[in-house]
Amino acid sequence: MISIRFFILILALAMFAAHAKNSDAELRKNVLESITPIDASVLSKEKNVLSELGQKLFFDANLSANGTISCNSCHNLKTYGVDNQPTSPGHDKTRGGRNSPTVYNAKFNFLQFWDGRAKDLAEQATGPLLNPIEHGLKDEAALVEIISKSAYVELFSKAFNAEKKPVTLKNVGIAIAAFEEHLVTESAFDEFLRGKDNALNTKQKKGLKKFVEVGCISCHQGTNLGGTMFQKIGLVNNYKTSDLGRFDVTKNEDDKYFFKVPSLRNIEKTAPYFHDGKVKTLKEAITLMAYHQLGEQLKPHEISDIEYFLKSLTSKKLPQFK
């Protein structure tokens, strides 16, 4: 005969499990109002001639003034799409003015660059090539000349077979963008959103709940947990910076100090943080964002909980490229 004490224990455990399941369902429901998991069809997208060409271009340092800088130099695919430097050195070692964001999952951003000056990946990919302190190529003609002297000509002809002159700056951007469409990573968080309760542990769920309650999710939303809007840095409490952000593009006074909200995917691996790359640790980034953007002074255990959740956004397996 089962003892009363044992029966009570079993009943308590069952009630706890039911409560936990209901809590998970409620948390998931709240999050799904603002964030959607990565669609499996995006992860299984097959490569084609165009994306294969884009992959070669992405890794080619010859597409720079002195043959030393490739897209991968600043957006290293082996280190989560960044170089882990505050700002990146260009072809002559001069550093840019802003932190190089990750190219992983960039396809989910509504605009590209911190100030949103590129409407899509194709336009973004061409910008650094002609930037005097990045790849440093003089003009489109210089790029075309480099490509025309290489084995790329045949690849461009195949990829853009309907065009008489397929080797153009625009087509280079289109090809690189086609490759970057494959730079998508998923995490345990996506599994949780799809319905797998145990994809996140108790502490990660606690951090996610705090992430929602504090208001982080008001800006870090969408599939990319960011990349869906501009926001003023120092929205509540001033953040000291000389960078005018979106204003540099629009010249609209209302756009001063507005930047594209960055993605939080793989954020654990993409330090240093913010547009200026001045914040070295994730704990510090959480602390400063809560204060400057939300007017919250989080307690140490709250910062730790949110950090623990953010680490669940790290993909354990990156796409492999030669």
Image (cartoon, grey):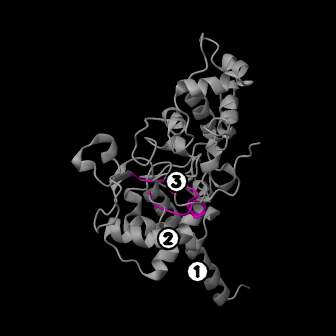
First of labels 2, 3 by sequence position = 3
First of labels 1, 2 by sequence position = 1
Left or right placement of residue 287 versus residue 82 in this view: left
Residue 75 appears anywhere in the view: no
Q: Residues within 10 Å of mark 3 (few under 14, many from 20)?
A: some
Measured along the vertical axis of the image, is residue 6 above or below residue 266? below
CA–CA distance in space, label 1 to label 3? 61 Å
Proximity of marks 1 and 2: CB atoms separated by less than 8 Å: no
Residue located at (46% from left, 52% from top): 35
CA–CA distance in space, label 2 to label 3? 32 Å
Q: Quadrant of the C terminus?
A: top right
Q: Which residues are magenta?
A: 260-275
**265 falls in the magenta region:** yes
Mark in front: 1 vs 3: 3
Percent of width and height locating residue 100: 53, 52
Question: Callout 1, which amino acid?
Answer: Ala
Report the residue marked by disc 2.
Answer: 306
Measured along the vertical axis of the image, is residue 136 above or below residue 276? above
In the foreground, 21 or 178: 178
Report the residue marked by disc 1.
Answer: 12
Percent of width and height locating residue 257: 31, 55
Q: Quadrant of the N terminus?
A: bottom right
**Farthest left residue?**
253
Report the residue marked by disc 3.
Answer: 95
Q: Residues within 10 Å of mark 2 (few under 14, many from 20)?
A: many
Task: Classify residue 15 by image quadrant.
Answer: bottom right
Question: Callout 3, which amino acid?
Answer: Arg
Percent of width and height locating residue 62: 68, 36
Label of residue 121 in the image: none
CA–CA distance in space, label 1 to label 2? 30 Å
Mark in front: 1 vs 2: 2
Q: Residues within 10 Å of mark 1 (few under 14, many from 20)?
A: few
